[in-house]
Image (spheres, rainbow, N blue to C red):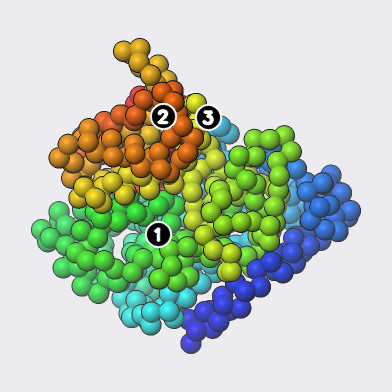
Amino acid sequence: MAASIVAKSIHKWKNNAVADQKRIMSELVLKANKTVFGIDHSFDKIKNYENFKDQIPVRDYEELRSYIDRVTDGIPNILWPGKPKYFAKTSGTTSGVKYIPITNDSMPNHIKSARNALLNYIHQVNNAEVFGGKLIFLSGSPVLEKKGGINTGRLSGIVNHEVPSWIRPNQLPSFETNCIDDWEEKLDKIVSETISQDMRLIGGIPPWVQMYYERILTKTGKKTIKEVFPNYSVFMYGGVNFEPYRTKLEELVGRRIDAIETYPASEGFIAFQDDQNDSGLLLNTNSGIFFEFIPVENIFDKQPKRLMLDQVVKNKDYALIINNNAGLWAYNIGDCIRFVQLNPYKIIVSGRVKHYISAFGEHVIGKEVEEAILLVANRHNVSIVEFTVAPQVGPKDGGLPFHEWFVEFDRLPADLEKFAAAVDVEMCTQNIYYDDLIKGNILQPLKMRALPKGSFINYMKSQGKLGGQNKVPRLSNDRKIVDQL
Protein backbone atom coordinates (compact mmCIF):
# COMPACT_ATOMS: atom_id res chain seq x y z
CA MET A 1 0.00 0.00 0.00
CA ALA A 2 2.78 2.46 0.99
CA ALA A 3 4.69 1.66 -2.21
CA SER A 4 1.61 2.38 -4.31
CA ILE A 5 1.00 5.72 -2.57
CA VAL A 6 4.64 6.79 -3.08
CA ALA A 7 4.58 5.76 -6.76
CA LYS A 8 1.40 7.79 -7.38
CA SER A 9 2.91 10.81 -5.62
CA ILE A 10 6.06 10.62 -7.75
CA HIS A 11 4.00 10.30 -10.94
CA LYS A 12 2.08 13.43 -9.95
CA TRP A 13 5.01 15.68 -9.13
CA LYS A 14 7.29 14.58 -11.95
CA ASN A 15 4.67 15.94 -14.37
CA ASN A 16 4.43 19.23 -12.51
CA ALA A 17 8.16 19.94 -12.22
CA VAL A 18 8.40 23.49 -13.58
CA ALA A 19 5.47 24.79 -11.51
CA ASP A 20 6.88 23.12 -8.39
CA GLN A 21 10.29 24.69 -8.98
CA LYS A 22 8.81 28.19 -9.28
CA ARG A 23 6.79 27.63 -6.10
CA ILE A 24 9.81 26.33 -4.17
CA MET A 25 11.91 29.33 -5.23
CA SER A 26 9.26 31.69 -3.82
CA GLU A 27 8.84 29.64 -0.62
CA LEU A 28 12.57 29.57 0.08
CA VAL A 29 12.93 33.32 -0.40
CA LEU A 30 9.90 34.06 1.79
CA LYS A 31 11.02 31.83 4.66
CA ALA A 32 14.61 33.18 4.67
CA ASN A 33 13.51 36.80 4.24
CA LYS A 34 14.56 37.84 7.76
CA THR A 35 17.83 35.92 7.95
CA VAL A 36 21.15 37.74 7.79
CA PHE A 37 21.68 36.42 4.26
CA GLY A 38 18.15 37.40 3.24
CA ILE A 39 18.58 40.95 4.51
CA ASP A 40 22.06 41.29 2.96
CA HIS A 41 20.67 40.20 -0.42
CA SER A 42 17.39 42.16 -0.31
CA PHE A 43 15.13 39.13 -0.47
CA ASP A 44 12.16 41.48 -0.07
CA LYS A 45 12.87 42.73 -3.63
CA ILE A 46 12.76 39.27 -5.21
CA LYS A 47 9.51 38.80 -7.14
CA ASN A 48 10.68 36.52 -9.98
CA TYR A 49 13.66 34.56 -11.24
CA GLU A 50 15.30 37.57 -12.88
CA ASN A 51 15.24 39.38 -9.51
CA PHE A 52 16.56 36.21 -7.87
CA LYS A 53 19.61 36.13 -10.16
CA ASP A 54 20.19 39.86 -9.68
CA GLN A 55 20.20 39.61 -5.89
CA ILE A 56 21.99 36.30 -5.31
CA PRO A 57 25.33 35.63 -7.05
CA VAL A 58 26.59 32.09 -7.69
CA ARG A 59 29.08 31.02 -5.04
CA ASP A 60 31.11 27.97 -4.10
CA TYR A 61 31.89 27.00 -0.49
CA GLU A 62 34.83 29.36 -0.12
CA GLU A 63 32.79 32.30 -1.37
CA LEU A 64 29.93 31.47 1.00
CA ARG A 65 32.29 30.78 3.87
CA SER A 66 31.88 34.10 5.72
CA TYR A 67 28.24 33.10 6.31
CA ILE A 68 28.88 29.41 6.98
CA ASP A 69 31.57 30.24 9.54
CA ARG A 70 29.00 32.22 11.53
CA VAL A 71 26.61 29.26 11.35
CA THR A 72 29.32 26.88 12.60
CA ASP A 73 30.04 29.33 15.42
CA GLY A 74 26.51 28.62 16.63
CA ILE A 75 24.90 31.92 15.60
CA PRO A 76 21.24 31.44 14.57
CA ASN A 77 19.33 32.93 11.61
CA ILE A 78 22.32 33.41 9.31
CA LEU A 79 21.49 31.40 6.16
CA TRP A 80 18.20 29.84 7.30
CA PRO A 81 15.89 30.51 10.28
CA GLY A 82 17.24 29.04 13.52
CA LYS A 83 20.20 26.66 13.66
CA PRO A 84 20.97 23.55 11.59
CA LYS A 85 20.15 20.11 12.98
CA TYR A 86 23.45 18.72 11.66
CA PHE A 87 26.56 19.66 9.75
CA ALA A 88 27.57 17.18 7.06
CA LYS A 89 31.36 17.14 7.07
CA THR A 90 32.98 16.72 3.67
CA SER A 91 36.50 16.98 2.29
CA GLY A 92 36.97 19.81 -0.17
CA THR A 93 39.82 19.96 -2.65
CA THR A 94 40.48 23.68 -2.12
CA SER A 95 38.57 24.54 1.06
CA GLY A 96 39.80 21.72 3.28
CA VAL A 97 37.01 20.38 5.48
CA LYS A 98 33.59 21.72 4.54
CA TYR A 99 30.58 21.91 6.85
CA ILE A 100 27.31 21.67 4.95
CA PRO A 101 24.22 22.56 7.01
CA ILE A 102 21.28 20.16 7.26
CA THR A 103 18.18 21.61 8.92
CA ASN A 104 14.94 20.19 10.26
CA ASP A 105 13.38 21.44 7.03
CA SER A 106 15.95 19.80 4.74
CA MET A 107 16.34 16.45 6.53
CA PRO A 108 13.20 14.95 4.88
CA ASN A 109 14.80 15.58 1.48
CA HIS A 110 17.57 13.13 2.38
CA ILE A 111 15.46 10.48 4.13
CA LYS A 112 12.20 10.53 2.17
CA SER A 113 13.98 10.62 -1.19
CA ALA A 114 15.87 7.41 -0.42
CA ARG A 115 12.62 5.88 0.83
CA ASN A 116 10.81 7.02 -2.34
CA ALA A 117 13.45 5.45 -4.58
CA LEU A 118 13.11 2.10 -2.81
CA LEU A 119 9.31 2.03 -2.47
CA ASN A 120 8.84 3.18 -6.06
CA TYR A 121 11.06 0.28 -7.17
CA ILE A 122 9.01 -2.16 -5.10
CA HIS A 123 5.81 -0.87 -6.71
CA GLN A 124 7.27 -1.06 -10.22
CA VAL A 125 8.61 -4.63 -10.05
CA ASN A 126 6.35 -5.99 -7.29
CA ASN A 127 9.29 -7.07 -5.13
CA ALA A 128 7.98 -6.54 -1.58
CA GLU A 129 9.96 -9.65 -0.57
CA VAL A 130 12.99 -7.40 -0.20
CA PHE A 131 11.70 -6.50 3.29
CA GLY A 132 11.36 -10.17 4.25
CA GLY A 133 15.06 -10.38 5.09
CA LYS A 134 18.01 -8.19 6.03
CA LEU A 135 19.47 -5.15 4.30
CA ILE A 136 22.73 -3.28 4.60
CA PHE A 137 24.03 0.10 3.48
CA LEU A 138 27.82 0.24 3.63
CA SER A 139 28.41 3.70 5.04
CA GLY A 140 30.61 5.95 7.11
CA SER A 141 30.71 5.97 10.89
CA PRO A 142 27.60 7.32 12.68
CA VAL A 143 29.80 8.73 15.47
CA LEU A 144 29.14 12.47 15.59
CA GLU A 145 31.17 15.32 17.02
CA LYS A 146 30.07 18.84 17.90
CA LYS A 147 30.69 21.97 15.84
CA GLY A 148 29.19 25.17 17.25
CA GLY A 149 27.00 22.97 19.43
CA ILE A 150 25.65 21.13 16.36
CA ASN A 151 26.03 17.38 15.74
CA THR A 152 28.54 16.90 12.92
CA GLY A 153 29.66 13.94 10.83
CA ARG A 154 29.69 12.34 7.39
CA LEU A 155 26.32 12.38 5.62
CA SER A 156 26.09 8.59 5.52
CA GLY A 157 26.74 8.51 9.27
CA ILE A 158 24.15 11.20 9.95
CA VAL A 159 21.56 9.30 7.92
CA ASN A 160 22.11 6.30 10.22
CA HIS A 161 20.57 8.36 13.03
CA GLU A 162 17.50 9.15 10.92
CA VAL A 163 16.67 5.70 9.51
CA PRO A 164 12.89 5.16 9.76
CA SER A 165 11.71 2.82 12.51
CA TRP A 166 10.13 0.42 10.01
CA ILE A 167 13.56 -0.32 8.47
CA ARG A 168 15.63 -0.59 11.66
CA PRO A 169 14.71 -4.20 12.60
CA ASN A 170 16.07 -5.40 9.23
CA GLN A 171 19.13 -3.16 9.11
CA LEU A 172 22.70 -4.39 9.42
CA PRO A 173 25.44 -4.03 10.58
CA SER A 174 25.09 -3.31 14.30
CA PHE A 175 25.61 0.25 15.48
CA GLU A 176 28.81 -0.79 17.26
CA THR A 177 30.28 -2.24 14.07
CA ASN A 178 29.26 0.80 12.07
CA CYS A 179 31.23 2.97 14.50
CA ILE A 180 34.55 1.29 13.68
CA ASP A 181 36.80 3.80 11.91
CA ASP A 182 39.29 1.47 10.26
CA TRP A 183 37.62 0.28 7.04
CA GLU A 184 39.27 -3.14 6.81
CA GLU A 185 38.58 -3.96 10.47
CA LYS A 186 35.02 -2.73 9.98
CA LEU A 187 34.62 -4.81 6.81
CA ASP A 188 35.72 -7.99 8.58
CA LYS A 189 33.18 -7.33 11.34
CA ILE A 190 30.43 -6.60 8.79
CA VAL A 191 31.21 -9.89 7.05
CA SER A 192 30.96 -11.76 10.36
CA GLU A 193 27.60 -10.16 11.16
CA THR A 194 26.03 -10.68 7.74
CA ILE A 195 27.50 -13.93 6.45
CA SER A 196 24.79 -16.12 7.95
CA GLN A 197 21.91 -13.67 7.44
CA ASP A 198 19.18 -13.62 4.78
CA MET A 199 20.56 -10.58 2.94
CA ARG A 200 18.12 -9.20 0.36
CA LEU A 201 19.26 -5.61 -0.26
CA ILE A 202 22.85 -4.36 -0.30
CA GLY A 203 23.69 -0.70 -0.77
CA GLY A 204 26.85 1.36 -1.04
CA ILE A 205 29.47 2.77 -3.40
CA PRO A 206 30.41 0.06 -5.96
CA PRO A 207 34.17 -0.30 -5.22
CA TRP A 208 33.53 -0.83 -1.50
CA VAL A 209 30.64 -3.22 -2.19
CA GLN A 210 33.06 -5.15 -4.41
CA MET A 211 35.46 -5.46 -1.46
CA TYR A 212 32.56 -6.72 0.68
CA TYR A 213 31.62 -9.34 -1.92
CA GLU A 214 35.21 -10.53 -2.26
CA ARG A 215 35.70 -10.76 1.50
CA ILE A 216 32.46 -12.77 1.83
CA LEU A 217 33.57 -15.23 -0.86
CA THR A 218 37.04 -15.61 0.66
CA LYS A 219 35.53 -16.37 4.06
CA THR A 220 32.92 -18.84 2.79
CA GLY A 221 34.87 -20.49 -0.03
CA LYS A 222 31.80 -20.05 -2.25
CA LYS A 223 32.07 -19.04 -5.90
CA THR A 224 29.24 -16.49 -6.03
CA ILE A 225 27.34 -14.19 -3.68
CA LYS A 226 24.06 -15.80 -4.75
CA GLU A 227 25.27 -19.05 -3.16
CA VAL A 228 25.77 -17.19 0.13
CA PHE A 229 22.66 -14.97 -0.11
CA PRO A 230 20.16 -16.82 -2.34
CA ASN A 231 17.41 -14.19 -1.78
CA TYR A 232 19.62 -11.18 -2.56
CA SER A 233 17.72 -9.24 -5.23
CA VAL A 234 18.45 -5.48 -5.08
CA PHE A 235 21.65 -3.43 -5.21
CA MET A 236 21.19 0.25 -4.29
CA TYR A 237 24.05 2.61 -5.04
CA GLY A 238 25.05 6.19 -5.69
CA GLY A 239 28.04 8.48 -5.89
CA VAL A 240 29.81 6.95 -8.90
CA ASN A 241 28.93 5.55 -12.30
CA PHE A 242 28.08 1.87 -11.88
CA GLU A 243 29.04 0.81 -15.41
CA PRO A 244 32.83 0.49 -14.89
CA TYR A 245 32.11 -1.91 -12.02
CA ARG A 246 29.07 -3.74 -13.43
CA THR A 247 30.87 -6.64 -15.12
CA LYS A 248 32.97 -7.51 -12.08
CA LEU A 249 30.15 -7.08 -9.56
CA GLU A 250 27.74 -9.21 -11.57
CA GLU A 251 30.42 -11.86 -11.98
CA LEU A 252 30.86 -11.92 -8.20
CA VAL A 253 27.11 -12.08 -7.57
CA GLY A 254 26.62 -14.82 -10.13
CA ARG A 255 23.96 -13.09 -12.21
CA ARG A 256 22.48 -9.68 -12.97
CA ILE A 257 20.20 -8.39 -10.24
CA ASP A 258 18.07 -5.25 -10.05
CA ALA A 259 19.98 -2.05 -9.30
CA ILE A 260 18.60 1.28 -8.11
CA GLU A 261 20.81 4.29 -8.79
CA THR A 262 20.54 7.31 -6.52
CA TYR A 263 22.23 10.72 -6.53
CA PRO A 264 22.67 11.79 -2.90
CA ALA A 265 24.98 14.62 -1.87
CA SER A 266 25.65 16.41 1.40
CA GLU A 267 23.91 19.43 -0.12
CA GLY A 268 20.76 17.46 -0.96
CA PHE A 269 19.30 14.32 -2.45
CA ILE A 270 19.35 15.38 -6.10
CA ALA A 271 17.79 12.55 -8.13
CA PHE A 272 17.00 8.84 -8.25
CA GLN A 273 16.21 6.12 -10.76
CA ASP A 274 12.44 5.72 -10.99
CA ASP A 275 12.29 3.12 -13.77
CA GLN A 276 14.22 -0.15 -14.08
CA ASN A 277 13.95 0.16 -17.86
CA ASP A 278 15.45 3.65 -17.95
CA SER A 279 18.92 4.53 -16.62
CA GLY A 280 18.08 8.26 -16.39
CA LEU A 281 17.67 9.70 -12.89
CA LEU A 282 14.48 11.59 -12.08
CA LEU A 283 15.35 15.08 -10.84
CA ASN A 284 13.95 15.65 -7.34
CA THR A 285 11.95 18.77 -8.22
CA ASN A 286 9.49 18.73 -5.30
CA SER A 287 11.74 18.26 -2.28
CA GLY A 288 12.83 21.64 -0.94
CA ILE A 289 15.52 22.33 -3.55
CA PHE A 290 15.33 25.01 -6.25
CA PHE A 291 17.73 24.05 -9.04
CA GLU A 292 19.64 26.26 -11.44
CA PHE A 293 21.83 25.21 -14.34
CA ILE A 294 24.89 26.87 -15.89
CA PRO A 295 26.23 25.65 -19.25
CA VAL A 296 29.52 24.06 -18.26
CA GLU A 297 31.50 26.21 -20.69
CA ASN A 298 30.25 29.33 -18.83
CA ILE A 299 30.85 28.17 -15.26
CA PHE A 300 34.04 30.18 -14.80
CA ASP A 301 32.61 33.37 -16.35
CA LYS A 302 32.33 36.38 -14.07
CA GLN A 303 28.57 36.48 -14.61
CA PRO A 304 27.67 33.04 -15.94
CA LYS A 305 24.45 32.36 -17.79
CA ARG A 306 21.95 30.86 -15.32
CA LEU A 307 18.92 28.85 -16.35
CA MET A 308 15.78 27.54 -14.71
CA LEU A 309 14.46 24.07 -15.36
CA ASP A 310 12.21 25.11 -18.26
CA GLN A 311 15.20 26.65 -20.09
CA VAL A 312 17.46 23.59 -20.30
CA VAL A 313 17.99 21.38 -23.37
CA LYS A 314 18.83 17.71 -23.75
CA ASN A 315 22.35 16.29 -24.12
CA LYS A 316 24.16 19.39 -22.91
CA ASP A 317 26.38 19.49 -19.84
CA TYR A 318 25.40 21.89 -17.05
CA ALA A 319 27.01 22.80 -13.76
CA LEU A 320 24.43 22.10 -11.07
CA ILE A 321 23.52 25.00 -8.78
CA ILE A 322 21.24 24.50 -5.80
CA ASN A 323 19.20 26.64 -3.42
CA ASN A 324 17.67 24.74 -0.54
CA ASN A 325 15.86 24.80 2.79
CA ALA A 326 19.15 24.27 4.61
CA GLY A 327 20.29 27.76 3.61
CA LEU A 328 22.49 27.14 0.59
CA TRP A 329 21.96 29.90 -1.95
CA ALA A 330 23.04 29.76 -5.62
CA TYR A 331 25.54 27.17 -4.44
CA ASN A 332 27.81 25.47 -6.95
CA ILE A 333 28.10 21.89 -5.67
CA GLY A 334 30.80 21.11 -8.24
CA ASP A 335 28.90 18.50 -10.28
CA CYS A 336 28.09 18.44 -13.98
CA ILE A 337 24.82 16.89 -15.11
CA ARG A 338 23.26 16.20 -18.50
CA PHE A 339 19.53 16.02 -19.26
CA VAL A 340 18.63 12.84 -21.12
CA GLN A 341 14.89 13.53 -20.99
CA LEU A 342 12.76 16.66 -20.51
CA ASN A 343 9.29 15.23 -19.93
CA PRO A 344 9.77 14.18 -17.19
CA TYR A 345 13.14 15.76 -16.33
CA LYS A 346 15.77 13.04 -16.12
CA ILE A 347 19.53 13.44 -15.81
CA ILE A 348 22.81 11.60 -15.70
CA VAL A 349 25.86 12.78 -13.77
CA SER A 350 28.51 13.63 -16.35
CA GLY A 351 31.38 14.54 -14.03
CA ARG A 352 32.81 17.05 -11.62
CA VAL A 353 33.40 20.68 -12.58
CA LYS A 354 36.91 20.46 -11.10
CA HIS A 355 37.57 16.91 -12.29
CA TYR A 356 38.43 17.40 -15.93
CA ILE A 357 41.44 17.66 -18.18
CA SER A 358 41.81 20.83 -20.18
CA ALA A 359 45.57 21.31 -20.31
CA PHE A 360 45.21 22.17 -24.01
CA GLY A 361 41.58 23.34 -24.25
CA GLU A 362 40.12 19.84 -24.71
CA HIS A 363 37.89 19.97 -21.58
CA VAL A 364 37.56 16.20 -21.26
CA ILE A 365 35.00 15.23 -18.60
CA GLY A 366 34.35 12.08 -16.59
CA LYS A 367 31.44 10.81 -18.64
CA GLU A 368 33.60 10.80 -21.79
CA VAL A 369 36.48 8.78 -20.37
CA GLU A 370 34.10 6.30 -18.74
CA GLU A 371 32.10 5.74 -21.91
CA ALA A 372 35.24 5.41 -24.05
CA ILE A 373 36.97 2.78 -21.93
CA LEU A 374 33.76 0.83 -21.25
CA LEU A 375 32.87 0.54 -24.93
CA VAL A 376 36.33 -0.80 -25.74
CA ALA A 377 36.47 -3.06 -22.67
CA ASN A 378 33.18 -4.70 -23.67
CA ARG A 379 34.46 -5.34 -27.21
CA HIS A 380 37.72 -6.84 -25.93
CA ASN A 381 36.17 -8.88 -23.09
CA VAL A 382 38.27 -6.92 -20.62
CA SER A 383 37.27 -6.22 -17.00
CA ILE A 384 38.37 -3.04 -15.20
CA VAL A 385 38.67 -2.53 -11.45
CA GLU A 386 39.44 1.20 -11.39
CA PHE A 387 41.18 3.91 -13.41
CA THR A 388 42.21 7.55 -13.43
CA VAL A 389 43.55 9.89 -16.13
CA ALA A 390 46.00 12.79 -15.97
CA PRO A 391 47.84 14.98 -18.51
CA GLN A 392 51.51 14.45 -19.29
CA VAL A 393 52.49 17.95 -20.38
CA GLY A 394 56.26 17.48 -20.57
CA PRO A 395 57.23 13.93 -21.59
CA LYS A 396 60.78 12.97 -20.68
CA ASP A 397 61.55 12.01 -24.27
CA GLY A 398 60.63 15.51 -25.41
CA GLY A 399 57.79 14.34 -27.66
CA LEU A 400 54.26 15.67 -27.88
CA PRO A 401 52.21 15.78 -24.65
CA PHE A 402 49.49 13.19 -24.07
CA HIS A 403 46.82 11.94 -21.69
CA GLU A 404 48.11 9.16 -19.46
CA TRP A 405 45.66 6.51 -18.26
CA PHE A 406 46.40 4.48 -15.13
CA VAL A 407 44.21 1.38 -15.19
CA GLU A 408 43.86 -1.50 -12.77
CA PHE A 409 42.48 -4.43 -14.77
CA ASP A 410 40.73 -7.48 -13.40
CA ARG A 411 41.25 -9.16 -16.77
CA LEU A 412 44.10 -7.71 -18.83
CA PRO A 413 43.69 -7.08 -22.56
CA ALA A 414 45.65 -9.43 -24.81
CA ASP A 415 47.44 -6.42 -26.33
CA LEU A 416 47.56 -3.32 -24.11
CA GLU A 417 48.80 -1.02 -26.90
CA LYS A 418 46.02 -2.10 -29.25
CA PHE A 419 43.49 -1.66 -26.43
CA ALA A 420 44.83 1.85 -25.67
CA ALA A 421 44.67 2.79 -29.36
CA ALA A 422 41.02 1.71 -29.49
CA VAL A 423 40.23 3.80 -26.40
CA ASP A 424 41.91 6.78 -28.08
CA VAL A 425 39.67 6.37 -31.14
CA GLU A 426 36.63 6.36 -28.85
CA MET A 427 37.90 9.47 -27.05
CA CYS A 428 38.08 11.26 -30.40
CA THR A 429 34.45 10.31 -30.95
CA GLN A 430 33.43 11.43 -27.47
CA ASN A 431 35.16 14.83 -27.52
CA ILE A 432 35.57 16.90 -30.68
CA TYR A 433 38.19 19.16 -29.10
CA TYR A 434 40.34 16.18 -28.18
CA ASP A 435 39.87 14.88 -31.72
CA ASP A 436 41.07 18.22 -33.15
CA LEU A 437 44.16 18.17 -30.93
CA ILE A 438 45.06 14.62 -31.98
CA LYS A 439 44.50 15.33 -35.70
CA GLY A 440 46.37 18.64 -35.43
CA ASN A 441 49.42 16.95 -33.84
CA ILE A 442 49.08 19.03 -30.69
CA LEU A 443 48.61 15.87 -28.62
CA GLN A 444 49.84 12.37 -29.32
CA PRO A 445 47.40 9.48 -28.72
CA LEU A 446 46.86 8.50 -25.12
CA LYS A 447 49.22 6.16 -23.31
CA MET A 448 47.98 3.52 -20.89
CA ARG A 449 49.70 2.02 -17.89
CA ALA A 450 48.41 -1.23 -16.34
CA LEU A 451 48.69 -1.14 -12.56
CA PRO A 452 49.12 -4.12 -10.21
CA LYS A 453 46.08 -5.49 -8.37
CA GLY A 454 45.22 -3.47 -5.28
CA SER A 455 46.89 -0.26 -6.48
CA PHE A 456 43.86 1.97 -6.00
CA ILE A 457 42.90 0.43 -2.67
CA ASN A 458 46.46 1.03 -1.45
CA TYR A 459 46.33 4.61 -2.76
CA MET A 460 43.02 5.31 -0.98
CA LYS A 461 44.41 3.73 2.19
CA SER A 462 47.46 6.00 2.00
CA GLN A 463 45.11 9.00 1.84
CA GLY A 464 43.00 7.81 4.77
CA LYS A 465 40.03 7.43 2.41
CA LEU A 466 39.46 3.70 2.35
CA GLY A 467 35.77 2.74 2.43
CA GLY A 468 32.66 4.73 3.25
CA GLN A 469 31.61 7.27 0.62
CA ASN A 470 35.11 8.02 -0.71
CA LYS A 471 35.74 7.86 -4.46
CA VAL A 472 38.78 7.89 -6.74
CA PRO A 473 38.63 10.92 -9.07
CA ARG A 474 38.47 9.77 -12.70
CA LEU A 475 40.24 12.89 -13.98
CA SER A 476 42.76 15.40 -12.72
CA ASN A 477 44.17 18.51 -14.35
CA ASP A 478 47.50 17.83 -12.63
CA ARG A 479 49.56 14.75 -11.73
CA LYS A 480 49.23 14.68 -7.93
CA ILE A 481 47.23 11.45 -7.86
CA VAL A 482 49.12 9.60 -10.58
CA ASP A 483 52.51 10.58 -9.16
CA GLN A 484 51.52 8.81 -5.93
CA LEU A 485 50.17 5.83 -7.88
Name the residue that disc number 3 marks: 361
The kind of residue tagged 2 is Lys
Is the residue under label 3 in contact with that under label 1 (CB below 8 Å)? no
CA separation, marks 2 and 1? 39 Å
Q: Which residue appears at 22% of the width and 62% of the height?
A: 253
Is the residue under label 1 in contact with that under label 2 (CB below 8 Å)? no
**What percent of the width, then of the height, locates residue 62?**
65, 35
**What percent of the width, then of the height, locates residue 302?**
72, 34
The nearer-to-camera label among 2 and 1 is 2
The nearer-to-camera label among 2 and 3 is 2
Q: Residues within 10 Å of mark 3 (few under 14, many from 20)?
A: few
Name the residue that disc number 1 marks: 237
CA separation, marks 2 and 3? 14 Å
- Mark seen at residue 421: none
Q: Which residue appears at 49% of the width and 35% of the height?
A: 433
Q: Which residue appears at 41% of the width and 51% of the height?
A: 240
**What percent of the width, then of the height, locates residue 347?**
52, 59
| Left-right relation of 337 to 172 | right
